[in-house]
Image: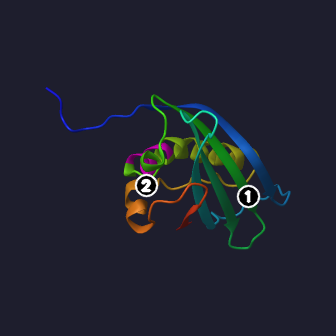
Amino acid sequence: MKTGTITHSIKPIRFQITDLQLNTPFTTKKKAKEKFGLKIGHTIQVDPENRKYFMVDFFADIVNIEQTVQIHVKFRTLFLADKEITDSLLQSPFMQQSPPAIAFPYLRAFILTLSSNVGIDPIILPPVNFTKIKEVCLPSKPGVENNHILQK
């Protein structure tokens, strides 16, 4: 028995850091737990040559209160879909919520590992509920960033 549900299958096939800028003082002294401000955003773009491929590009800007630690990251996840991504599918809640929700934990893990390895307190990005964010931020047009400002 068929239902009216349309199903789509997507899978991430590549993760890539496309830009990384890190400014942190060299010190061996351990500071008290620092507070960081975080601004993240993302775009979703379809490959015009093969519409089964699409990318989620995240950016993250992380700065401590004293502004001595600054991290800027651009992170890309390439996805493959089982069907071509139409413009209406791209604007659907499924596409606006699911791919970023799949890709974001990889960005979180990268930031945690990077911060731990450079000798500052580990920075653990908070989980993001992209369903709730989409209630506030209307679906983006292709190439238009959805910005989210979080305080850690």
Q: Is residue 151 visible?
A: no
17 or 116, which lies in front? Answer: 17
What type is the residue that disc 2 sits on? Phe
Comparing labels 2 and 1, the label whose residue is closer to the camera: 2
| Residue at image point 63% right, 66% down | 36
Residue 114 placed where, x, y %? 71, 46
Residue denoted by label 1: 71
Q: Give the mark nearest the N terminus, 2 or 1.
A: 1
Asked whether disc 2 touches disc 1, contact meaning CB atoms under 8 Å apart, the reply is: no
Residue 116 placed where, x, y %? 69, 46
Residue 91 placed where, x, y %? 44, 53
Residue denoted by label 2: 130
Q: Is residue 98 magenta?
A: yes
| Residue at image point 67% right, 62% down | 62
Compared to residue 19, the image places residue 137 above or below, namely: below
- Residue farthest to the right, as pictured: 26
| Residue at image point 71% right, 63% down | 31
Local SS, label 2? helix
Compared to residue 24, the image places residue 5 above or below, namely: above
112 or 1, which lies in front? Answer: 1
- Residue farthest to the top, as pictured: 1
What type is the residue that disc 1 sits on? Ile
Q: Is residue 16 visible?
A: yes
Query: Is residue 122 left or right of 3 when viewed as pictured?
Result: right
Please give the range of residues in magenta: 94-99
Find residue 13 and report its image quarter.
top right
Query: Is residue 6 left or right of 88 when viewed as pictured?
Result: left
